[in-house]
Amino acid sequence: MGDGVTPTAASAPGKCILFGEHAVVYGQPAVAVAIEQRLTVAMTPAPSWSVDGSPLNSKKHPHIVMLKDALMDEDRPMAIHISGDIPNASGLGSSAALSAAVGAAMHHLSTQQQPLDKDRLSSLAHLAEAHAQGGRASPMDASTSVEGGVVILSNQREERGDWLYTRRLETPEGERTWEVHSLPAATEEVHLVLGNTGVHAPTSRQVAMVAKALAAQPHRMQEIEAIGTVARRGIDALIRGDYEAVGHAMSENHLLLRNLGVSSPELENLIQAAAPTSLGVKLTGAGGGGCMVALTRDPKTTGEAIELAGGRVLISRLGNPGVHLDSSG
C-alpha cells in the first residue's frame, strides 16, 4: 500500500448466542449479541483479485467470491487484507463478520459514498453463508454482524423486540423462513466473558447428532420446546434489564443443552470454573467444543477463573455496534 492509495476499509463484529442454539433449527426463538471483537477488511485497487497476498479462490474464499459477483464490476480488481481478533472456527461468527465487512466495503466502492443498505447487506451476507455451507444457514450470524446490538431470530413475529425483516432461504430440505428482530443493547455494566476450549466441533455434525436423537426418541422434542420457553423468558428479562434473570435463563438453557448431549468435558470444566462469579453461564453455539459464555459483573475475576481452568478468554460488553465503514479513499 505504498502507492499512496487509501484503502476502503470496513469492520464487523463477531457474535455470541445467549439463548436457543439447536432449538432455533426447529422454529424456537434464539438470541445473539454482537461482541466487541471485530474483523476488519481493507481493499485497495490492484492488478488482480487477491486475499492477504494469495489469489482469490472460490474454494478457499466462497463468501468473498459470491459477494464480489453480486456487488463489484469485473474490471475493478482489489487486493483484500483481513485482520481482527475474532478466533476462527470457534462459534463466534468469524465468517459472517467477514461477509458483512467485505459486503460493506464492496457496497461502498460500487455505490460511491451512498449510505449502507443494511437490509440488502445482511441478506447478501446470509446468502454468502449459505453458499459456503452447502445451502444451509440461518440468518442469525449475518444479521447480528450487520445490525449489531442484540438480535432475536424466530419462526414468527415476536411481540418482544423490534421486527426488522423476514428472511427466506431455499435449502436442500425445502424453503425455510425466519423473522428477525432487534433489542436495545444493555445499558448496565454487565459483561460477557467467553472461554474458548480450543476444541473444534463442526456445527453440521452437532446439528446432525441432535436430529438423529430426536428421530430416535420423538418425545425429546419436549426438550427443544423447553429451550424455546427459556429463551422467551430470557428475552423478557433482557427487555426489563433484569440481568439476574437473564443469567438464570442462560444457566437453565445450558442444562437443557447438556441433556441434549451437545456439551463436552472441556466446556463443562470452563463452565464450572466461571459459575461462582457469574450471573449465568452456558455453552454458546453448536457445542461439542468451541466456546462457553458467562454473564458477569466482575469480568476480571471470571476471566481469570476460566484461564486457570485452561480456557482462552475474550471479554465483551453486552451488545456492540454492527458493521461500519472505517475509512475510505
Image (tube, grey):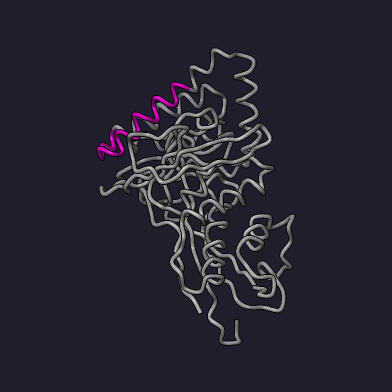
Direction from residue 36 to residue 84 in the image, left or right: right
Q: Which quarter of the figure has residue 306?
A: top left
Q: Residue at x 58, y 37 (%)?
A: 289
In the rendered structure, which segment of residues is drawn in magenta?
Answer: 225-244
Q: Quadrant of the N terminus?
A: bottom right
* 255 drawn magenta: no
Q: Residue at x 46, y 60 (%)?
A: 117
Nearest the eye: 15 or 279? 15
x and y, in percent, of residue 302 in the image? 38, 43
Q: Which quarter of the figure has residue 133?
A: top right
Q: Is residue 275 above or below residue 315?
A: above
User: In this orientation, does residue 191 appear?
Assistant: yes
Q: Is residue 103 above or below residue 33?
A: below
Direction from residue 15 to residue 279 in the image, left or right: left
x and y, in percent, of residue 307 in the image? 47, 46
x and y, in percent, of residue 34 in the image? 43, 50
